[in-house]
């Protein structure tokens, strides 16, 4: 029987009280259970693990996996044999099904494919329950004033995210609203696919107690708050998806007079880590394994930056993520964090995404989130990969990799039209586009940085 949120939250608090030993014991037990379940129910893992010992509670014994490998074995990877890629793709083709249960059981979310492979990920109710139970760790430390502000705003939460697709933040919020319709009015998604003034007006009307979204967009909203156009007073701001610098954290905290609690999450494992007041992310190590490694997948000691990181999601059973190369650089804190948490403390170094500052039609400048371009170009037919490089204040170089079967000239024309429309909607003027002959540049981690703003002098 699946444990309740209350039971799992109680165990999470007990794990922290027991300290590193109690956390490590839970991690080993849950890793062994996850490996056993994968071997018993996934043909892919059964074959991959055939030479391993009967019980495995040491992650370093497991072979490394990545998105390309797992997606190429999709049907054999899942532990529910009734699920196929063909059926999932049919479900994903309908944007009206965002957040609905696939086969009456699973949440489906996609990634945009910065490594050249689009990720399709399913999660089960057990995973969602664990995620909810760990939420109290992220919400700790707001104090009496912050809690009072949450109450006076009726607990309303604004999720500012890309819409029009099965992205995790949008899909998981929609799922929560469908499962708990009586809470629907206090959890709302606000689309970034609209002009900034319209988004600001919607947020002013909603007046949320907390607001979550990508760091780059929240930084833009902090600028709107500073200018007096946005007038909200959230108790907590929850940036995610991009590296939060001390400067960015302080700016957001000051602009909104709020507690800033960044989260480190991925579609593959949304419960990875939460931040503390000292700017470190604390890994939920009782439910996730995070291994910093070098380019040859050898362990990197605390205090040294890693080439990439391997993660194991110990909560999701339907689609096991075990020793998975996430592609992010990381540094583990070598000493205890001043906040007192016994959970491992990390700094993430590979997910920074800068705002793109372009000339506005009124002669000023406007900063746009990379997510705006991502959600637009991901939907253009025939685009395999892309990269926008700002080569001048008013010029964007577009590196396109069309799909093999696509007409590259037609893809380029469509991309130009869509970019022109996007910038016009956001009141950007005088920007020209040039077509790059070179392919998008790939980082050493394998990821493609899709937006490269103009280098600062």
Image: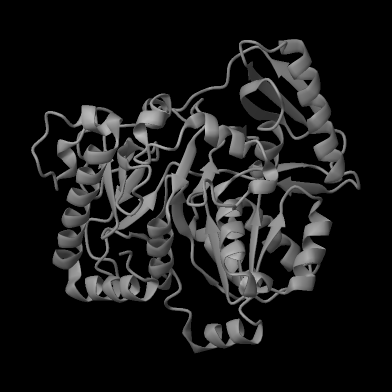
Q: Residue furthest right?
A: 362
The residue located at (19%, 61%) in the rendering is: 26
Instruction: Decide which of 241, 254 is in the foreground and name it.
Output: 241
Whether residue 190 is situated above or below residue 146 in the rendered picture:
above
Residue 387 visible within the image: yes
Total numbered badges shown on the rendered structure: 0
> How far from the left and from the top, in percent, is residue 202?
79, 65
Q: Quadrant of residue 287?
A: bottom left
Is 124 displayed left or right of 48 in the figure? Answer: right
Q: The C terminus lies in which quarter of the figure?
A: top right
Whether residue 122 is situated above or below residue 270 in the rendered picture:
above
The residue located at (66%, 29%) in the rendering is: 388
> How far from the left and from the top, in percent, is residue 245?
49, 55
> How far from the left and from the top, in percent, is residue 61?
14, 37
The residue located at (68%, 20%) in the rendering is: 382
Q: The N terminus lies in which quarter of the figure?
A: bottom left
Residue 457 visible within the image: no
């Amino acid at each position: 029987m699946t444990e309740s949120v209350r039971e799992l939250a109680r165990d999470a608090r007990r794990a922290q009280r027991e300290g590193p030993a109690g956390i490590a014991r839970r991690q080993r037990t849950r890793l062994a259970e996850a490996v056993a379940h994968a071997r018993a129910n996934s043909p892919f893992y059964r074959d991959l693990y055939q030479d391993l010992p009967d019980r495995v509670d040491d992650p370093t014994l497991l072979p490394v996996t990545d998105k390309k490998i797992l997606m190429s074995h999709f049907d054999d990877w899942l532990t529910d044999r009734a699920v196929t890629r063909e059926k999932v793709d049919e479900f994903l083709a309908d944007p009206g099904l965002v957040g609905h249960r696939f086969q009456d059981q699973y949440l489906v979310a996609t990634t945009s494919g910065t490594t050249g492979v689009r990720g399709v990920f399913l999660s089960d109710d057990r995973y969602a329950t664990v995620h909810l139970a760990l939420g109290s760790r992220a919400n700790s430390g707001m104090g009496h004033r912050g809690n009072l502000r949450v109450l006076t705003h009726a607990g309303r939460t604004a999720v500012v995210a890309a819409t029009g697709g099965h992205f995790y933040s949008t899909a998981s919020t929609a799922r929560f609203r469908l499962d708990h319709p009586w809470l629907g009015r206090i959890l709302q998604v606000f689309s970034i696919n609209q002009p900034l003034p319209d988004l600001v007006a919607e947020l002013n009307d909603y007046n949320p107690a907390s607001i979550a979204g990508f760091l780059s967009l929240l930084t833009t909203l902090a600028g709107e708050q500073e200018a007096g156009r946005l007038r909200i007073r959230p108790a907590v701001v929850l940036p995610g998806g991009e590296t939060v610098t001390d400067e960015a954290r302080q700016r957001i905290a000051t602009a909104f007079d709020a507690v800033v609690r960044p989260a480190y999450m991925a579609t593959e494992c949304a419960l990875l880590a939460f931040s503390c007041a000292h700017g470190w992310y604390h890994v939920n190590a009782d439910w996730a394994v995070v291994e910093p490694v070098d380019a040859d997948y050898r362990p990197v000691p605390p205090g040294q930056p890693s080439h990439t990181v391997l993660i194991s999601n110990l909560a999701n059973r339907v689609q096991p993520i075990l020793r998975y190369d996430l592609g992010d650089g990381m540094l583990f804190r070598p000493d205890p964090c001043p906040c007192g948490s016994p959970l491992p403390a990390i700094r993430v170094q590979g997910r920074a995404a800068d705002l793109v500052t372009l000339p506005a039609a009124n002669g000023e400048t406007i900063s746009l989130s990379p997510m705006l371009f991502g959600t637009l170009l991901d939907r253009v037919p025939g685009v395999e990969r892309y990269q926008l490089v700002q080569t001048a204040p008013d010029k964007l170089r577009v590196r396109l990799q069309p799909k093999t079967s696509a007409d590259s000239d037609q893809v380029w024309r469509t991309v130009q039209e869509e970019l022109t429309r996007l910038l016009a909607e956001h009141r950007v003027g005088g920007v020209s586009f040039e077509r790059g002959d070179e392919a998008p540049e790939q980082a050493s981690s394998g990821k493609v940085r899709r937006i490269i703003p103009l280098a600062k002098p």
